[in-house]
Image (spheres, grey):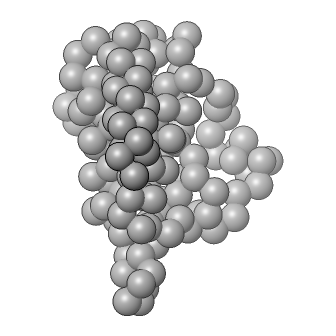
Amino acid sequence: MGTLTRWERVIEHWERALVARVRRREPVELLDALRRECDGRAVVCGPTRVVVPNVYTVELADTPHRELIPHRARVGEALTDSLLRHADRRGYEWAGPVTVRIVRSAHVPNGRYRVSSNPMSRIRADALARIAPGLP
């Protein structure tokens, strides 16, 4: 059990380092925002069943989005992996396949990012392309 915990910490450190390279200011804040969104939208469906949204959107202001463009696939994977581990630790059940989208927005309240989520039970590739053109 101790070995698994150490490996989990190493992977989380790698994620934070990756995000820090892409976005120098407050890199862990985005991971924490995704986790808070997941926890805040959890729905208790029974004594042992808690369902959370599976589609997360990270809206970035222009400057962070420009900095992220060359690395968005790797960062998207790191954010998704972190969210999956978080939900696994908490015993959450996903509403469907997990997706983290990174998009540009001129209307983020703090000037840097905004995180939102929605439960989508079934995601077809053609439907997702209509919702979010230009996904990585």
Numbered label tally? 0
Q: Residue at (55%, 68%) from the top-left corner? A: 95
Above or below, 67 against 38 in this view is above
Query: In this view of the protein, can residue 119 be seen by the observer?
Result: no
Residue 101, given in percent of the width and then of the height, sits at 53, 38
Foreground of the two, 114 or 38:
38
Q: Residue at (76%, 55%) from the top-left corner? A: 124
Residue 13, given in percent of the width and then of the height, sits at 34, 26
Residue 70, given in percent of the width and then of the height, sits at 55, 10
Foreground of the two, 31 or 114:
31
Q: Residue at (36%, 63%) from the top-left corner? A: 90
Q: Quadrant of the C terminus?
A: top right
**Relative to 62, is 121 on the left or the right?**
right
Q: Extreme right residue here?
A: 126
Image-quadrant location for residue 60: top left
Q: Extreme bottom residue here?
A: 46
Q: Extreme front residue here?
A: 2
Above or below, 16 against 90 in this view is above
Residue 89, given in percent of the width and then of the height, sits at 38, 58
Image-quadrant location for residue 79: top left
Query: In this view of the protein, can residue 68 be seen by the observer?
Result: yes
